[in-house]
Image (cartoon, rainbow, N blue to C red):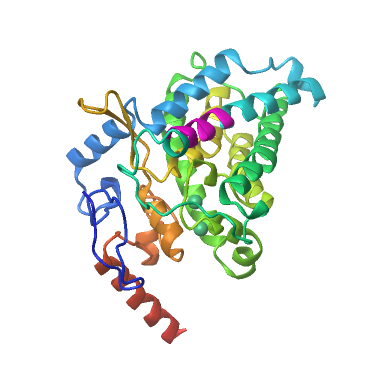
Amino acid sequence: MPLTSSSPEGGRAMWNYAPELPLRSAPFLHWPPRPVAIARHLGRTWLPLRSRFFMLAVAFGIWAWFMPSLERTKSLEFGWIFEIWLRNLVLVTLVAGGLHVWFYVVGRQGDSLRYDARPFGRNKRVFLFGNQVRENVVLTLTSAVVILTAFESLILWAYANGHARLISLDSSPVWFVVFLVVIPWWSILYFSAHHRLLHVGPAYRRIHSWHHRNTNVGPWSGLSMHPAEHLVLFSDVVLLFLLPSHPLHLYFMMMHHGLGAPLSHTGYDALLLGPRNGRRARFELGDFHHQIHHRFIECNYGGYESPLDEMLGAWHDGTPEGAAVLAHRSRKRAATS
Ligand SMILES: [Zn+2]
Ligand SMILES: [Zn+2]
Protein backbone atom coordinates (compact mmCIF):
# COMPACT_ATOMS: atom_id res chain seq x y z
CA MET A 1 0.00 0.00 0.00
CA PRO A 2 1.76 3.20 -1.08
CA LEU A 3 1.33 5.96 1.44
CA THR A 4 1.50 9.55 0.31
CA SER A 5 0.17 11.52 3.26
CA SER A 6 2.18 14.36 4.69
CA SER A 7 3.85 14.26 8.08
CA PRO A 8 3.41 17.13 10.54
CA GLU A 9 7.21 17.23 10.79
CA GLY A 10 8.18 17.27 7.20
CA GLY A 11 5.11 18.32 5.28
CA ARG A 12 6.00 15.95 2.46
CA ALA A 13 5.30 12.36 1.51
CA MET A 14 6.47 10.17 4.36
CA TRP A 15 7.10 6.78 2.81
CA ASN A 16 7.46 5.15 -0.58
CA TYR A 17 5.85 2.03 0.88
CA ALA A 18 4.37 1.26 4.28
CA PRO A 19 2.83 -1.93 5.64
CA GLU A 20 -0.68 -1.81 7.07
CA LEU A 21 -0.99 1.21 9.32
CA PRO A 22 -1.35 2.10 12.12
CA LEU A 23 1.48 -0.17 13.14
CA ARG A 24 0.49 -2.39 16.08
CA SER A 25 2.62 -4.24 18.60
CA ALA A 26 2.61 -8.06 18.75
CA PRO A 27 -0.69 -9.48 20.10
CA PHE A 28 0.85 -11.00 23.23
CA LEU A 29 1.33 -7.42 24.48
CA HIS A 30 -2.37 -6.55 24.19
CA TRP A 31 -4.98 -6.55 26.95
CA PRO A 32 -7.39 -8.35 27.22
CA PRO A 33 -5.48 -11.43 25.97
CA ARG A 34 -6.24 -12.62 22.42
CA PRO A 35 -5.16 -16.28 22.44
CA VAL A 36 -6.04 -16.95 18.78
CA ALA A 37 -4.13 -13.89 17.57
CA ILE A 38 -1.18 -14.86 19.79
CA ALA A 39 -1.13 -18.42 18.39
CA ARG A 40 -1.36 -17.08 14.83
CA HIS A 41 1.46 -14.61 15.49
CA LEU A 42 3.73 -17.25 17.00
CA GLY A 43 3.04 -19.66 14.14
CA ARG A 44 3.78 -16.96 11.57
CA THR A 45 7.02 -15.71 13.08
CA TRP A 46 8.58 -19.19 13.13
CA LEU A 47 7.70 -20.03 9.52
CA PRO A 48 10.34 -20.62 6.84
CA LEU A 49 10.93 -17.53 4.66
CA ARG A 50 11.16 -15.52 7.88
CA SER A 51 14.31 -14.06 9.45
CA ARG A 52 13.83 -16.08 12.65
CA PHE A 53 13.79 -19.40 10.84
CA PHE A 54 16.73 -18.35 8.66
CA MET A 55 18.80 -17.39 11.72
CA LEU A 56 17.99 -20.70 13.41
CA ALA A 57 18.97 -22.62 10.26
CA VAL A 58 22.28 -20.74 10.02
CA ALA A 59 22.92 -21.36 13.74
CA PHE A 60 22.33 -25.06 13.19
CA GLY A 61 24.69 -25.05 10.18
CA ILE A 62 27.47 -23.39 12.18
CA TRP A 63 27.09 -25.84 15.05
CA ALA A 64 26.98 -28.86 12.74
CA TRP A 65 29.77 -27.95 10.30
CA PHE A 66 31.69 -24.80 11.24
CA MET A 67 32.28 -24.92 14.97
CA PRO A 68 35.74 -25.76 16.39
CA SER A 69 35.84 -28.74 18.75
CA LEU A 70 35.71 -27.89 22.45
CA GLU A 71 39.01 -29.78 22.82
CA ARG A 72 40.63 -26.99 20.82
CA THR A 73 38.84 -24.14 22.59
CA LYS A 74 40.21 -25.12 26.02
CA SER A 75 42.92 -22.52 25.52
CA LEU A 76 42.59 -19.22 23.71
CA GLU A 77 44.81 -19.83 20.67
CA PHE A 78 45.20 -17.93 17.41
CA GLY A 79 44.34 -20.87 15.09
CA TRP A 80 40.72 -21.56 16.00
CA ILE A 81 39.95 -17.92 16.80
CA PHE A 82 41.21 -16.95 13.33
CA GLU A 83 39.01 -19.68 11.79
CA ILE A 84 35.83 -18.46 13.47
CA TRP A 85 36.69 -14.82 12.65
CA LEU A 86 37.03 -15.80 8.98
CA ARG A 87 33.74 -17.74 9.08
CA ASN A 88 31.94 -14.77 10.67
CA LEU A 89 33.48 -12.40 8.11
CA VAL A 90 32.28 -14.59 5.22
CA LEU A 91 28.83 -15.07 6.76
CA VAL A 92 28.17 -11.37 7.39
CA THR A 93 29.54 -10.49 3.93
CA LEU A 94 27.29 -13.05 2.26
CA VAL A 95 24.15 -11.88 4.05
CA ALA A 96 24.67 -8.08 4.17
CA GLY A 97 26.54 -7.99 0.85
CA GLY A 98 24.13 -10.40 -0.85
CA LEU A 99 21.10 -8.33 0.20
CA HIS A 100 22.83 -5.10 -0.83
CA VAL A 101 23.65 -6.49 -4.28
CA TRP A 102 20.14 -7.89 -4.70
CA PHE A 103 18.33 -4.68 -3.75
CA TYR A 104 20.71 -1.87 -4.62
CA VAL A 105 23.18 -3.08 -7.28
CA VAL A 106 21.19 -5.50 -9.43
CA GLY A 107 18.00 -3.78 -8.26
CA ARG A 108 15.86 -6.87 -8.76
CA GLN A 109 12.85 -5.25 -7.09
CA GLY A 110 13.31 -1.63 -7.99
CA ASP A 111 11.56 0.41 -5.29
CA SER A 112 8.81 -2.14 -4.86
CA LEU A 113 8.20 -2.64 -1.08
CA ARG A 114 10.98 -0.16 -0.28
CA TYR A 115 10.08 2.06 2.67
CA ASP A 116 12.17 5.11 1.90
CA ALA A 117 13.22 5.65 -1.70
CA ARG A 118 15.80 8.36 -0.94
CA PRO A 119 19.32 7.44 -2.11
CA PHE A 120 22.11 6.61 0.35
CA GLY A 121 24.43 9.43 1.41
CA ARG A 122 27.25 10.29 -1.02
CA ASN A 123 29.70 13.16 -0.89
CA LYS A 124 28.69 13.85 2.70
CA ARG A 125 31.44 14.73 5.14
CA VAL A 126 29.58 13.13 8.01
CA PHE A 127 30.48 9.67 6.63
CA LEU A 128 33.93 8.05 6.47
CA PHE A 129 35.21 8.50 2.88
CA GLY A 130 32.18 10.78 2.41
CA ASN A 131 30.08 7.76 1.49
CA GLN A 132 27.40 6.03 3.59
CA VAL A 133 27.72 2.55 2.10
CA ARG A 134 31.54 2.55 2.34
CA GLU A 135 31.40 3.61 5.99
CA ASN A 136 28.76 0.94 6.67
CA VAL A 137 30.89 -1.80 5.07
CA VAL A 138 34.08 -0.78 6.87
CA LEU A 139 32.52 -0.59 10.36
CA THR A 140 30.73 -3.90 9.82
CA LEU A 141 33.67 -5.90 8.51
CA THR A 142 36.18 -4.53 11.03
CA SER A 143 34.82 -3.75 14.48
CA ALA A 144 31.52 -5.68 14.28
CA VAL A 145 33.02 -8.98 13.08
CA VAL A 146 35.98 -8.78 15.47
CA ILE A 147 33.83 -8.08 18.54
CA LEU A 148 31.25 -10.72 17.58
CA THR A 149 34.13 -13.21 17.25
CA ALA A 150 35.56 -12.14 20.61
CA PHE A 151 32.29 -12.95 22.39
CA GLU A 152 31.96 -16.28 20.57
CA SER A 153 35.55 -17.17 21.56
CA LEU A 154 34.83 -16.29 25.18
CA ILE A 155 31.78 -18.57 25.39
CA LEU A 156 33.47 -21.48 23.53
CA TRP A 157 36.40 -21.17 25.94
CA ALA A 158 33.95 -21.08 28.89
CA TYR A 159 32.15 -24.23 27.63
CA ALA A 160 35.45 -26.08 27.30
CA ASN A 161 36.61 -25.12 30.76
CA GLY A 162 33.34 -25.61 32.65
CA HIS A 163 32.72 -21.89 33.30
CA ALA A 164 29.49 -22.11 31.26
CA ARG A 165 27.30 -25.20 31.74
CA LEU A 166 26.82 -27.34 28.64
CA ILE A 167 23.67 -29.36 28.01
CA SER A 168 22.46 -31.49 25.11
CA LEU A 169 19.03 -32.27 23.68
CA ASP A 170 19.28 -35.72 25.33
CA SER A 171 20.33 -34.49 28.76
CA SER A 172 17.79 -31.61 29.07
CA PRO A 173 15.20 -31.84 26.27
CA VAL A 174 12.60 -29.53 27.85
CA TRP A 175 15.03 -26.76 28.78
CA PHE A 176 16.78 -27.12 25.40
CA VAL A 177 13.54 -26.32 23.52
CA VAL A 178 12.21 -23.74 26.00
CA PHE A 179 15.46 -21.77 25.89
CA LEU A 180 15.54 -21.86 22.10
CA VAL A 181 12.00 -20.45 21.94
CA VAL A 182 12.77 -17.75 24.52
CA ILE A 183 15.96 -16.50 22.82
CA PRO A 184 14.21 -14.16 20.33
CA TRP A 185 12.45 -12.37 23.21
CA TRP A 186 15.61 -12.21 25.29
CA SER A 187 17.31 -10.70 22.30
CA ILE A 188 14.65 -8.05 21.66
CA LEU A 189 14.27 -7.13 25.34
CA TYR A 190 18.03 -6.80 25.73
CA PHE A 191 18.18 -4.69 22.56
CA SER A 192 15.27 -2.46 23.66
CA ALA A 193 16.79 -1.74 27.07
CA HIS A 194 20.34 -0.94 26.00
CA HIS A 195 19.19 0.92 22.88
CA ARG A 196 16.98 3.22 24.99
CA LEU A 197 19.94 3.96 27.28
CA LEU A 198 22.12 4.74 24.25
CA HIS A 199 19.74 7.59 23.46
CA VAL A 200 20.61 9.37 26.70
CA GLY A 201 22.94 12.42 26.65
CA PRO A 202 26.63 11.67 26.06
CA ALA A 203 25.95 8.01 25.17
CA TYR A 204 23.98 9.25 22.18
CA ARG A 205 26.34 12.07 21.21
CA ARG A 206 29.55 10.07 21.50
CA ILE A 207 28.45 6.55 20.54
CA HIS A 208 24.99 5.89 19.17
CA SER A 209 24.93 8.92 16.84
CA TRP A 210 27.28 6.93 14.57
CA HIS A 211 24.45 4.48 13.83
CA HIS A 212 22.02 7.38 13.34
CA ARG A 213 24.08 8.93 10.57
CA ASN A 214 21.97 6.44 8.59
CA THR A 215 18.70 8.35 8.27
CA ASN A 216 17.82 5.94 5.50
CA VAL A 217 19.07 2.38 5.83
CA GLY A 218 20.37 -0.53 3.79
CA PRO A 219 21.62 -4.00 4.80
CA TRP A 220 25.12 -2.73 5.60
CA SER A 221 23.69 -0.08 7.96
CA GLY A 222 22.52 -2.68 10.49
CA LEU A 223 25.94 -3.19 12.06
CA SER A 224 27.34 0.23 11.18
CA MET A 225 27.96 1.65 14.62
CA HIS A 226 30.64 2.79 17.09
CA PRO A 227 32.80 -0.11 18.38
CA ALA A 228 31.57 0.62 21.92
CA GLU A 229 28.03 -0.08 20.69
CA HIS A 230 29.18 -3.37 19.13
CA LEU A 231 30.59 -4.26 22.53
CA VAL A 232 27.23 -3.66 24.20
CA LEU A 233 25.13 -5.17 21.39
CA PHE A 234 26.94 -8.52 21.25
CA SER A 235 27.44 -8.89 25.01
CA ASP A 236 24.02 -10.45 25.62
CA VAL A 237 25.63 -13.89 25.22
CA VAL A 238 27.13 -13.52 28.73
CA LEU A 239 23.72 -14.83 29.85
CA LEU A 240 25.22 -18.24 29.00
CA PHE A 241 27.50 -17.94 32.04
CA LEU A 242 24.34 -18.07 34.15
CA LEU A 243 22.04 -20.50 32.32
CA PRO A 244 22.82 -24.00 31.06
CA SER A 245 22.98 -24.05 27.27
CA HIS A 246 24.04 -25.81 24.09
CA PRO A 247 26.18 -24.23 21.32
CA LEU A 248 23.00 -24.02 19.21
CA HIS A 249 21.68 -21.51 21.77
CA LEU A 250 24.90 -19.53 21.54
CA TYR A 251 24.76 -19.34 17.74
CA PHE A 252 21.03 -18.59 17.61
CA MET A 253 21.63 -15.74 20.06
CA MET A 254 24.63 -14.45 18.09
CA MET A 255 22.70 -14.54 14.81
CA HIS A 256 19.99 -12.26 16.24
CA HIS A 257 22.43 -9.37 16.12
CA GLY A 258 25.14 -10.59 13.71
CA LEU A 259 22.64 -11.37 10.93
CA GLY A 260 19.46 -9.92 12.46
CA ALA A 261 20.76 -6.35 12.11
CA PRO A 262 21.54 -6.59 8.35
CA LEU A 263 18.26 -8.46 7.77
CA SER A 264 16.18 -5.85 9.60
CA HIS A 265 17.86 -2.83 8.00
CA THR A 266 17.41 -3.70 4.31
CA GLY A 267 14.93 -0.83 3.90
CA TYR A 268 12.50 -3.27 2.24
CA ASP A 269 9.44 -4.97 3.69
CA ALA A 270 10.18 -8.27 1.94
CA LEU A 271 12.37 -9.87 -0.67
CA LEU A 272 10.26 -11.05 -3.59
CA LEU A 273 11.21 -14.42 -5.04
CA GLY A 274 10.20 -15.96 -8.35
CA PRO A 275 9.31 -14.57 -11.78
CA ARG A 276 8.44 -10.88 -12.01
CA ASN A 277 4.97 -11.32 -13.49
CA GLY A 278 4.05 -14.54 -11.68
CA ARG A 279 2.85 -14.91 -8.09
CA ARG A 280 5.97 -14.18 -6.05
CA ALA A 281 6.90 -15.69 -2.71
CA ARG A 282 7.92 -13.19 -0.03
CA PHE A 283 10.91 -13.60 2.26
CA GLU A 284 9.73 -11.39 5.12
CA LEU A 285 12.42 -8.94 6.19
CA GLY A 286 10.81 -5.71 7.06
CA ASP A 287 11.24 -3.84 10.24
CA PHE A 288 9.14 -0.78 9.52
CA HIS A 289 9.06 -0.07 13.27
CA HIS A 290 12.85 0.43 13.26
CA GLN A 291 12.80 2.28 9.94
CA ILE A 292 10.56 4.86 11.66
CA HIS A 293 13.16 5.06 14.44
CA HIS A 294 15.87 5.93 11.91
CA ARG A 295 13.68 8.68 10.42
CA PHE A 296 12.28 10.24 13.61
CA ILE A 297 14.91 9.07 16.16
CA GLU A 298 13.20 9.74 19.52
CA CYS A 299 10.60 6.96 19.24
CA ASN A 300 10.39 3.19 18.63
CA TYR A 301 13.47 2.22 20.65
CA GLY A 302 12.43 -1.41 20.98
CA GLY A 303 10.69 -3.66 18.48
CA TYR A 304 7.12 -4.56 17.77
CA GLU A 305 7.51 -7.58 20.09
CA SER A 306 8.86 -5.45 22.94
CA PRO A 307 6.61 -3.67 25.48
CA LEU A 308 9.10 -0.83 25.98
CA ASP A 309 7.78 1.80 23.56
CA GLU A 310 4.17 1.51 24.68
CA MET A 311 5.30 1.63 28.33
CA LEU A 312 7.30 4.81 27.67
CA GLY A 313 4.71 6.43 25.42
CA ALA A 314 7.28 6.34 22.62
CA TRP A 315 5.33 4.18 20.17
CA HIS A 316 5.17 5.75 16.69
CA ASP A 317 2.55 3.93 14.64
CA GLY A 318 3.78 5.24 11.29
CA THR A 319 0.86 7.59 10.63
CA PRO A 320 0.92 11.40 10.68
CA GLU A 321 -1.65 11.23 13.51
CA GLY A 322 0.67 8.92 15.48
CA ALA A 323 3.54 11.35 14.98
CA ALA A 324 1.37 14.23 16.20
CA VAL A 325 0.37 12.33 19.37
CA LEU A 326 4.01 11.53 20.06
CA ALA A 327 5.08 15.16 19.52
CA HIS A 328 2.31 16.33 21.88
CA ARG A 329 3.47 13.88 24.58
CA SER A 330 7.09 15.03 24.21
CA ARG A 331 6.09 18.68 24.55
CA LYS A 332 4.03 17.87 27.66
CA ARG A 333 6.95 15.94 29.18
CA ALA A 334 9.37 18.76 28.42
CA ALA A 335 6.99 21.29 30.00
CA THR A 336 6.65 19.28 33.24
CA SER A 337 10.35 18.40 33.63
ZN1 LIG B 1 18.68 4.57 18.06
ZN1 LIG C 1 19.16 0.71 13.32
234 versus 163 height, above or below: below
**Residue 30 in view:** yes
**Residue 244 in view:** no
**Quick one: 215 or 112, which is closer to the camera?**
112
Estimate the x, y position of residue 257 in percent, counting from the top left.
53, 39
Q: Residue furthest bottom?
A: 335
Quarter holding residue 42: top left
Estimate the x, y position of residue 179 in percent, counting from the top left.
46, 31
Lateral position of residue 240 relative to residue 156, left or right: left
**Quick one: 82 or 168, which is closer to the camera?**
82
Going 28% across and 46% down the picture, which residue do you hit? 28
Quarter holding residue 205: bottom right
Q: Which residues are magenta?
A: 93-102
37 versus 180 height, above or below: below
6 versus 285 height, above or below: below
Estimate the x, y position of residue 115 in percent, counting from the top left.
35, 50
Magenta region, main secondary structure: helix
Q: How many numbered markers are drawn? A: 0
Estimate the x, y position of residue 240 in percent, counting from the top left.
60, 34
> Is 178 covered by the magenta stretch?
no
Lateral position of residue 7 relative to residue 82, left or right: left
**Quick one: 50 or 187, which is closer to the camera?**
50
> Is 98 covered by the magenta stretch?
yes
Quarter holding residue 247: top right
Going 63% across and 39% down the picture, which residue do you hit? 238
